[in-house]
Amino acid sequence: MLGDGKTAYDHEHDNEKTEVDIRRREVATKLRLTYLKEQRKLQLQLQTEKWEEWKVCFEVSDFEMPATEIYLGFSAITGEVSDAHE
């Protein structure tokens, strides 16, 4: 989903207007989440077009991870379609 941080997700239409099509591609869609402690930067990259070609999805500066007990979770809402997430 491409979002501007203000527009709500359109559940009724499975957010068709702002979705990014990542299904049935020749390249596996992958996400890479990186935290650079010294730079205090969190970054999410996507591989969707070519193998080992990563595009920055978002980047957060001045981000500091908690020192202990870090839990990380990902979730997906697919509406009427079915996907496998590994």
Image (cartoon, rainbow, N blue to C red):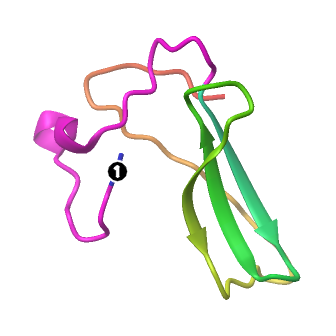
Q: Nearer the viewer, residue 49 or 86?
A: 49
Within 10 angstroms of label 1, few (less than 14), some, or many (20 or more) residues? few
Q: Nearer the viewer, residue 79 or 28?
A: 28
The answer to whether 82 is drawn above or below residue 10 in the figure is: above
Q: Which residues are magenta?
A: 3-28
Residue in the image at 51% along x and 14% along y: 25
Q: Amino acid at mark 1?
A: Leu
- In this image, 80 relative to 62: left or right? left
Magenta residue check for 84: no
Where is residue 51, by image quadrant? top right
Work out which residue is located at the far bottom of the displayed protein and give it.
62
Number of marks in picture: 1
The answer to whether 27 is drawn above or below residue 2 in the figure is: above
| Residue 33 picture location, percent across and down | 71, 54
Q: Nearer the viewer, residue 41 or 67?
A: 41
Where is residue 52, by image quadrant? top right
Residue in the image at 50% along x and 46% along y: 75
- In this image, 3 relative to 58: left or right? left
Work out which residue is located at the far left of the displayed protein and give it.
12
Residue in the image at 20% along x and 63% along y: 7
Judging from the image, what secondary structure is the residue with disc 1 in?
loop
Residue in the image at 58% along x and 11% along y: 26
Q: Looking at the magenta stretch, what is its main secondary structure?
A: loop
Q: Quadrant of the C terminus?
A: top right
Residue of label 1: 2
